[in-house]
Amino acid sequence: MKLAKTYQPDLYESDIYALWEQSGAFTPLKKGAPYSLVVPPPNANGNLHMGHALSFAMQDIAARYHRLKGERVLFVPGADHAGFETQVVFERELDKQGKSRFDYSREELYNQIFTFVDQNRDNFQTQIRKLGASVDWSRYVFSLDQTIVKQAYATFQKMWQEGLIYRGERLVNFCTFHGTAFADIEVDYQEEQGHLWKIRYPLSDGSAELVVATTRPETLLGDTAVAVNPSDKRYTAVVGKSVKLPLTNREIPVIADSYVDTSYGTGALKVTPAHDQNDFEIAARHDLPYVSVIGFDGKMMHNVPEPYRGLSVKEAREAVLKDLKDQGLLVGAEELTHSVGHCYKCATLIEPLLKEQWFIDIKPLAKNALEAIRAGKLAFMPKSKQAQLERYLENIKDWNISRQIVWGIPIPAFQNEEDPGDWIYDDRVDQEVITVDNKHYRRDPDVFDTWFSSSSWPYQTLGFPESKDFHDFYPLSLMESGFDLLFPWISRMLMLGLYVTNDIPFKEVYLHGMITDAQGRKMSKSIGNVTDPIELIAKYGSDALRIGVITGQTPGNNQPFVEAKVVGGRNFINKLWNIARFSEGVIDSFETQDATPATPIDHWILQRYALTKQSYLKLMDSYRFYEAYETLYRFIWDDLADWYLEASKVQPNKPLLAALLKGALVLVHPFAPFVSETIWQTLNLSTDGLLSGQQPYELNSGNKEQADQFEVVKDLILEIRSLLTATNATKVKLYYRNEPIVASFATLINQLGGTIAVEDGEPGQGIALSNSGLSCWLDIDQESVDHYVKRLEVQIVEKQRLTRQLTDRLANSKYVSQAPKELVNESRAQQVEAEQTLENLLQEKMRFAPHD
RNA sequence: GGGCGCUUAGCUCAGUUGGCUAGAGCGCUUGCUUUACACGCAAGAUGUCGGGGGUUCAAGUCCCUCAGCGCCCACCA
């Protein structure tokens, strides 16, 4: 025996992976239809989590399946520098050493993080290998590789030249703890209890007062107007006048703007352009000044009245409220629930602060993306995500791409030291100051939002613009990712892809849901419900994890992770191994391709193989991997193992068994790459080596009539087993009369049915069988008959129900006239059969219990 | 305030354009040292497909409605 008694994944997996890698099996073939996908690059610094396990599983199944179809598959691995994410992790490390980012220069910090990330490289790549991802490592890309950086610069320059990049002082979402701005979609909004305070603003002429409502009283120090709705009769008289801003010496105008909701609060809105997005927009419409009162450190700035200077926002709020109250300007407060933005890493309140940043004028790009989607150039799975993306693109806002961190791609822009309005594009970012036309320009200290560079991933990784890969494999066939990346990544890849390459970046988008814990909660370190895929691999094997994670997988739906699914996968792997072990013991040579069916069971299994393969191919082509797996599972376990292998113990067709084993291994390979390959290699199933170079076997598809004969035998065996169990009878003989099929399968029936003999005999020596329609009976002793009668009664009730159902259906004239003819005929046949069976059951019951 | 998804066996979930007596894994019951497998074999039990209404010869599947859960978006000061 070459195959060991049990399959121990850890003994084989790393060797098998190394073999694949060395043999070049992951490199695209020279011919065949192209099929391409790139890995959504995981954070180079981190460990892979269950989401990655799922994502890699889906992608690798697709990649291996398309290889099996003889296609030229390109599967590109990569890693992302994940700017902010990684810097946060690194700063935590610094914190442990009692240091902070402020202890280092920008370059020192960058280099330290680079080393930090680089040290994780082996760990990171090993994990991907453990998952069995059949990626082409020779094409591995890191998002800070020079080619990627250059491409980011090229894109930025192109946008710069075409006027799509602008530098603007806008409100940005600023985390005062991390000291950086975020894009709108990165802000984490949460419902919170708060107060709506009402504050008196006296008119300058003393004639009256306005009461404004606010959740942020401290920002009144930066108010530059009070706004009311132009149609609000209550305030018509005061529009155009001015009010005295409390706690300050300033006077600010009362303006009319239709943004103001007359029914909210008091209908009078304090306008703080530098600290509120809506107020910012109102100010733009009315040409109001912007007064910043909160600094980037989260403290009140020096332009506020002395008592408040340097206070934190929270302290300032308390102080302002106290002073207002003391001056009788605080009218009241009511409770309210409102949604407040937080930093998604540290939960610090996000302050909208005025800052100069680089923005992309995104609307023209979004328009092109929308056109491509609406023209049906991309297929979304699930389909519902397409509409969601369209709505997002319709309402998209300009994209702030500046980040105030060091870990990222420096923005290639320089500012004239003499003239702050003079910015130039230049990619000499390794220099802090450059001289152009005798003028000194200083480098923008910011880096790009990571999503800016990673949104070029589909073409960057292929070596755009001139490489052969780009020519051969772009657009990508598939983009597989979590649906949480639909807006931050998928949408931007689509927009940038169209902008830079003039073509869509991918043809199909498959979006998986989130893997949650068994209770449906998000996996998080703080709850402590995180499952580590690498640990699961150590426990059950990589194939088992893969199967476990795709069990029940459907696009767009979250999946609670339950370990039992992995156990199910492990059990199946064990089944495969043992099918192979059995085959090894029976088969003399695996070399023959002669799979000629000899008996009805041969025809039957070949039919099952053909049907399975047909449905498998169809399901795989439409990314319904779990259903394809299930179909295959049923064939391998139920048909091949439970029936064909058992039958092979009586009368083996060795060449056919060999062919079926190979056929099953090829089909199962995308789902269980390691075990299928291990078996293939160990048994030396082909000379051309790797299974990934194989294609699904075309076997004789069997003869239906012959196959149906075996179905009859199968039914007979099932009935025998069932009766023997029901009666608890032992040492029972099966008799038959004038049934050549039973005669020819006598040995098989005897063995699989669990009788002691199958003989030609006189009727009436025991219990007659009813299901198979054969004239057979079991020689069962009288004591067992009571059990049998009970069972008959259950069956009679069931058959009566079925007969009634079918009779009703056929009595319905509309059904007979309107339903498809085949269906009606089928119902008739079923009715006849059911009635016959019922009749047999009733007669049988009469024989044994005539009194009832 | 909009939009979307989910609700099917004890648990976790499949179930394509409506059509065999609604399925799987794990769990459960009973019996098995059947020489590939106890990570197994065999025989079983468990569902008014969230409630109600409608369309249809036929509804888990389509439509309406109600309820519960979850997610996303949004400028409620």
Image (cartoon, helix red, strand yellow):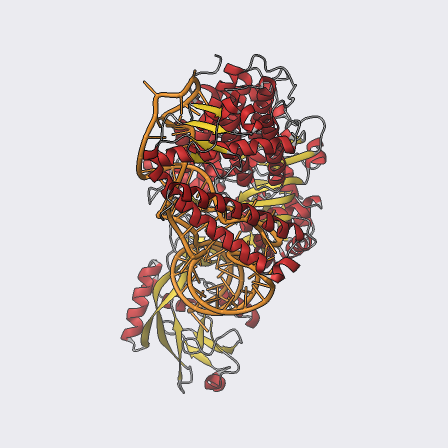
Q: Quadrant of residue A664?
A: top right
Instruction: Tell me if residue A734 comes above or below residue A811 in the rendering.
Output: above
Instruction: Name the residue: 64% across, 26% down.
Output: A697
Query: Is A239 positioned to the left or the right of A349 in the image?
Result: right
Instruction: Tell me if residue A406 comes above or below residue A733 in the rendering.
Output: below
Instruction: Name the residue: 58% across, 54% down.
Output: A389
Q: Quadrant of residue B68?
A: bottom left
Is there any visible trace of residue A127 in the rendered image?
no
Q: Position of residue A462 (x, y in %)?
A: 65, 34
Q: Position of residue A659 (x, y in %)?
A: 60, 22
Q: Nearer the viewer, residue A451 or A256?
A: A451
Q: Nearer the viewer, residue A106 or A164?
A: A164
Query: Is A770 positioned to the left or the right of A590 in the image?
Result: left
Q: Quadrant of residue A705?
A: top right
Instruction: Tell me if residue A587 comes above or below residue A27 in the rendering.
Output: above
Instruction: Name the residue: 46% across, 80% down.
Output: A242
Is there any visible trace of residue A482 in the rendered image?
yes
Count the marks.
0
Q: Nearer the viewer, residue A209 or A485?
A: A485
Q: Position of residue A105 (x, y in %)?
A: 45, 38
Q: Position of residue A243 (x, y in %)?
A: 43, 79
